[in-house]
Amino acid sequence: MLMGKLFDSLEPDEDADRISLLRRFEIERLMTSVLVGVGTFWIILAAYAGEPYVVGLGMLVALGSLVSLVLLRFKRYFLARHLWLLSGISAIFLGACIIHESANMSFMFLAAVGAPLLVFSIKHELDWIVLYISVPVILWSILQIFGNEAFGTVVVSQDVAEQYFKFPAQVSTVAIIMLQLISASLIANTYS
C-alpha cells in the first residue's frame, strides 16, 4: 500500500508525533477522496430517485470533500479538516431531517463520530476532538428526542426512503467505519 511504503521509509529516530501527523494528513487525503466518491454515488442515486434535495446533499459531501482535498494540497490543513468535518456532519443532519426516518439516515452519525479521531491529535488537539464528537452526538440526540418530522422538513416519502436510501445509508456508514478502523490501525502503528 502506498501509505505504508511512504511512512515505512521514514527514519526510526524521527519524532513519533511528526510521523503521526504525516499519517493523519495522508489518512485525511484518503478519507476525503473516498467521500468524494460516496457523495458522487449519492448524487447519482438521488437523481435516479428523482429527489433534488438529496442530490444537493450529495453535492455538499462531494464538493466539501473536493475543496478539502484542494486545501490539503496547498497545505491548509486546519481549514481542510474543519471544512471536511462540517460538510459531512451538515449533510448527515440535513439528510436525516429531509428524508423520512424509515431510511434511518441518523445511523450515518456513527461514521461522523469516528472521523475527528483520525484527523486530530489526542495529544495536541483534544478540544477539537471533543467538539467534533459532541456535535454529531447532540444532533443525533435531538433527532431521537423530537424526530425528524418535528422540523417540518421531511420531503422524501417513506416509500422512496425505504426503496432508495435505507440500504445505501447503511452500506455507506459501514464502509466508512471500516475505513476509519483501518486508518486508526495505521496511526496506532506509529506508536508501536
Image: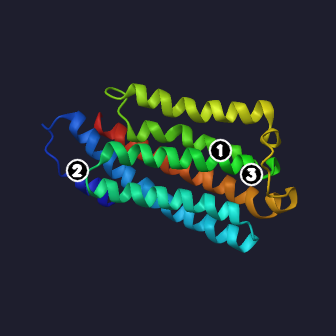
Furthest-front residue in view? 152
Marks 2,3: beta carbons within 8 A: no
**Residue 52, position in %: x, y?**
70, 66
Circle 1 is placed at which residue position? 93
Mark closest to the chain's N terminus, 2 or 1: 2
Camera-side mark, 2 or 1: 1
Look at mark 2 in the image and give the residue it sits on: 8
Q: How many marks?
A: 3
Q: Residue at x 22, y 34 (%)?
A: 16
Image quadrant occupied by the N terminus: bottom left
Whether residue 103 is situated above or below residue 160 in the rendered picture: above
- In front of the other: 79 or 39: 79
User: Going from the N terminus, do you reach mark 2 or mark 3 first?
Assistant: 2
Q: Residue 81: x and y, percent?
A: 39, 45
| Amino acid type indicated by mark 2 | Asp
Count residues near mark 3 (Cα–Cα under 10 Å), then give few for <14, some for 14-19, many for 20+: many
